Image (cartoon, helix red, strand yellow):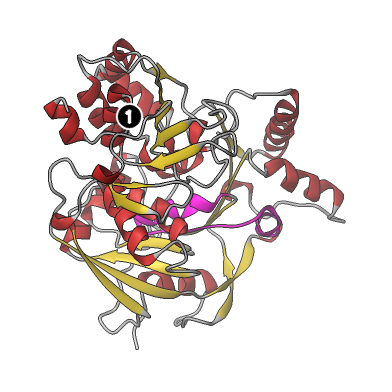
């Protein structure tokens, strides 16, 4: 009986030849990441709860300030200072103001075959490069930090066979929301989503990041693609080498299989207040909005900014709409500047922000008020996610968000092109 990609990564980390779903193994972690959402709690436990505090390998640690940048209060400033001082004292890689943690990790650290813990639920993004990334709490992160190890209950794997290609004007974001809408927000609880097939191989690394990033919104432990030539080229461009390149065996066991024909995917929107409340975008067109957000670890990359800029070019953001554009990293921001995208957004009336989590996090930038409506490329839309409990968050693609910002109400890219 063969193994899946995820099982092979765990077996490598556990130092054994074979693992099976349901096994529990002690594993050596390749890398750990923590952001300013909880690192201050980890630091407090390190100092107050441990008799002989130590860090197993500082080279495996990465601290990233991205949730509240710049700090929005004295309390936040204190938490970030604690994180900053600890990183400096222990020689931990520290990033601040450079972008969203998962984008930074993909640009600078993640390698195929690695087992990575991150103190953030969207750590599953790293599967786009054939790594096993999963989110953990700050207590589990602390254990990994001081021992270099952890334990893993080997998850079952669900195969998602993708065929065909996405039609023009339809994006990876529409695909993943469609998948979540079909299988449900609890559709793959503590399971691995493995994306395979010709359709999967046709997706760019950036598009793969979109699918893996949102996997946790379906309950997944992680999501993963095979590290093919596209993934290895992405790595080579950034001067990195894979830890190991794994492919699933022909006789690997999958608990369930789905097939999605990409050619049949259409623009969709997730309605408030659940990410699996997915409907065709045309069904909610006409809903008046107060704010639009283009950014986040799911949709703040250069591809998304290109799409958004192409839609607003020569147009103006509706008078009653605040349109926040937030590149996912400094690298993305600089490239967008070189391509003239930032100027296009600003000429349209958009507000271009520094790279950070911004509206997706909903605590420092673009917070929406009572009964206000947001159309967002963020990751979640539960009640109160972006502000007042009575506010409403709709999730859509970069194209839908940009078109809606101009129209002043939820609107698809094709409707915007027709002037409807």
User: Looking at the picture, does residue 364 appear above or below residue 18?
Assistant: above
User: Looking at the picture, does residue 145 appear above or below residue 75?
Assistant: below
* Residue underneath mark 1: 409
**Label 1 secondary element:** loop
- Which residue sits at x=48%, y=38%? 392
Q: Which of 164 and 90 is in front in this view?
A: 164
Q: Which of 122 and 262 is in front in this view?
A: 262
User: Looking at the picture, does residue 195 appear above or below residue 395?
Assistant: below
Q: Where is residue 386 in the image (x, y as percent from the top left)?
A: 54, 36
Task: Specify the quadrant that holds the C terminus.
Answer: top left
Which of the 4 image quarters holds residue 332?
top left
Q: Where is residue 248 in the image (x, y as percent from the top left)?
A: 31, 74
Q: What stretch is highlighted in magenta?
A: 120-145
Question: Is 91 situated left or right of 362 in this image?
Answer: right
Question: Is 87 situated left or right of 382 in this image?
Answer: right
Question: Is 138 situated left or right of 276 in this image?
Answer: right
Task: Specify the quadrant that holds the N terminus.
Answer: bottom left
Residue 137 in the magenta stretch? The answer is yes
Q: Let me know if residue 111 appears in the view.
A: no
Q: Where is residue 377 in the image (x, y as percent from the top left)?
A: 38, 38
Q: Where is residue 370 in the image (x, y as percent from the top left)?
A: 57, 30
Which of the 4 image quarters holds residue 72?
top right
- Which residue sits at x=46%, y=56%? 217
- Which residue sits at x=48%, y=45%? 381
Graded by Cα atoms within 10 Å as few (under 14), some (14 to 19) or many (20 or more), the crowding at tag 1 reads: many
- Which residue sits at x=68%, y=43%? 39
Q: Let me know if residue 190 appears in the view.
A: yes
Residue 224 in the magenta stretch? The answer is no
Question: Is 393 situated left or right of 73 in this image?
Answer: left
Specify the principal SS of the magenta part: helix
Q: Nearer the viewer, residue 233 or 83?
A: 83
């Amino acid at each position: 009986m063969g193994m899946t990609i995820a099982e092979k990564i765990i077996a490598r980390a556990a130092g054994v030849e074979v693992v099976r779903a349901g096994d529990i193994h002690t594993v050596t972690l390749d890398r750990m990441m923590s952001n300013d959402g909880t690192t201050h709690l980890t630091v407090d436990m390190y100092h107050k709860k441990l008799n002989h505090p130590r860090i197993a390998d500082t080279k495996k640690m990465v601290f990233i300030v991205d949730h509240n940048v710049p700090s929005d209060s004295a309390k936040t400033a204190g938490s970030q200072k604690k994180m900053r001082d600890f990183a400096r004292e222990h020689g931990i890689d520290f990033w601040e103001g450079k972008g969203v943690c998962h984008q930074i990790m993909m640009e600078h650290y993640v390698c195929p075959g690695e087992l990575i813990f991150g103190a953030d639920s969207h750590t599953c993004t790293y599967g786009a490069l054939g790594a096993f990334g999963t989110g953990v709490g700050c207590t589990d992160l602390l254990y990994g930090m001081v021992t270099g190890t952890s334990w893993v209950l080997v998850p079952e794997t669900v195969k998602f066979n993708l065929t065909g290609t996405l039609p023009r004007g339809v994006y990876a974001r529409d695909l993943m929301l469609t998948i979540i809408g079909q299988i449900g927000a609890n559709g793959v609880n503590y399971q691995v989503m493995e994306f395979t097939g010709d359709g999967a191989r046709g997706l760019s690394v950036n598009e793969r990041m979109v699918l893996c990033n949102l996997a946790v919104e379906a309950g997944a432990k992680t999501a993963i693609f095979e590290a093919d030539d596209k993934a290895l080229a992405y790595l080579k461009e950034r001067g990195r080498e894979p830890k190991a390149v794994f492919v699933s065996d022909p006789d690997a066991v999958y608990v369930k299989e789905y097939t999605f024909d990409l050619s049949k995917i259409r623009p969709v929107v997730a309605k408030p207040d659940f990410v699996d409340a997915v409907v065709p975008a045309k069904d909610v067109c006409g809903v008046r909005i107060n704010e639009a957000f283009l950014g986040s670890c799911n949709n703040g990359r250069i591809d998304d900014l290109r799409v958004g800029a192409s839609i607003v070019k020569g147009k103006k953001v509706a008078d009653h709409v605040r349109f926040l554009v937030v590149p996912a990293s400094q690298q993305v921001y600089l490239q967008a500047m070189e391509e003239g995208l930032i100027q296009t957004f600003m000429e349209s009336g958009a507000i271009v922000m520094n790279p950070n989590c911004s509206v997706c996090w909903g605590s420092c930038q673009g917070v929406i008020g009572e009964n206000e409506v947001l159309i967002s490329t963020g990751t979640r839309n539960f009640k109160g996610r972006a502000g007042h409990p009575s506010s409403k968050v709709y999730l859509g693609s970069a194209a839908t968000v940009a078109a809606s910002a101009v129209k002043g109400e939820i609107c698809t890219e094709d409707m915007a092109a027709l002037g409807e």
